[in-house]
Amino acid sequence: MILFRNGHQLAGYLEQEKKKGKMIGFVPTMGALHHGHLSLVESAKQHTDITVCSIFVNPTQFNDPTDFQKYPITIEYDIFLLEKAQTDVLFLPQEADLYPNGVAQLESYDLGYLETILEGKSRPGHFQGVCQVMERLLTLVRPDDLFMGQKDYQQCMVVKKLLTIMKMPVRFHACPIQREADGLAMSSRNMRLNETQRKNASAIFTALYFTKSHIGTMPLNQIKAQAWNILLENSFRIDYIEIVDAITLEEHQEIKDKHDLVALIAAYQAEVRLIDNMLL
Ligand code: AMP
């Protein structure tokens, strides 16, 4: 695995490889890697010739400063895991490299309705931050294929929109959610849960699974109320539970076609915010 800390050197290297006809697959991450991230690397290896992974905890996408300060950093173990997964290139940029003029005044993106709901509504500025860092990374890597997780369902939609805004012809792969044995979606933030919170945390999966198995058998608001109770019984503080159109993210009062719906949950165990979703 070749490690680059400098963006221009990375771009230069990849340019040479592209001239040789190599296809570039890109997996952007914030580190504290787990099997979910590695599944994206695996997918990139299957579809492309050179797999580039980046690790950068992007300050501009954290609307909560404590969340940023407490974000887990396990860089040495990350490098070990990426080597083992036979990743070709690791990009480890410094903040000053990506944001040479600081982060005080950055460009903004017209994300429309997408930014007014769910994560966009709960975390003001979050998706602007995602676009700011993704535009920089994409401009350096110029991948043929981009691999991101369905775990961050709305983020996938935001990044697809960014690719249209940037007029960048990149194939987008939304990769399936990797889960622990009890159903909890793998997440870097799970490391911050204590034993009790970790046990409680799988209730998100229980609530999503309840939703999926009862869709069509009872009204949506009753399903949501039951899912809400499952989380409350497991000491969750709930941000949202929504059942929306899987393509537009618009709310439905009633079910038209159950295959086009997605259930999304954001909820806290103490101060740790977890998100998950399930196509219904
Ligand atoms: P993060 O490091 O949390 O920014 O995540 C980097 C990428 O890994 C994003 O595209 C996430 O959606 C994806 N990812 C995170 N957790 C999972 C998971 N459990 N299964 C699949 N992909 C994931």
Image (cartoon, rainbow, N blue to C red):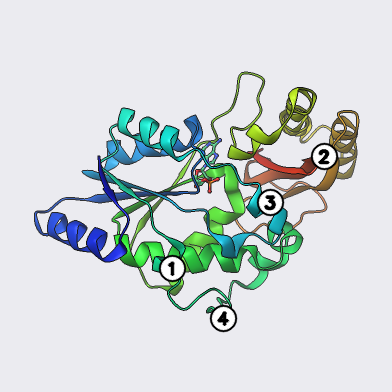
The kind of residue tagged 3 is Asp
First-in-chain label (1 vs 4): 1
> Which mark is on residue 105?
4
Q: Check disc 3 and report the residue beneath it.
A: 67
State how far apart marks 1 and 4 are (Cα). Answer: 14 Å
The kind of residue tagged 4 is Gln
Q: State the residue lying farthest toward the left.
A: 20
First-in-chain label (3 vs 2): 3
Badge 4 marks a residue whose secondary structure is loop
Q: Residue 31, position in %: x, y?
A: 49, 43
Does the numbered disc 3 mark a residue whose Cβ is under 8 Å from ligand 1? no
Place residue 257 in its image quadrant: top right
Badge 2 marks a residue whose secondary structure is loop
State how far apart marks 2 and 1 are (Cα). Answer: 33 Å
Q: Nearer the viewer, mark 3 or mark 1?
A: 1
Q: Check disc 1 and report the residue beneath it.
A: 96
Q: Nearer the viewer, residue 111 or 274?
A: 274
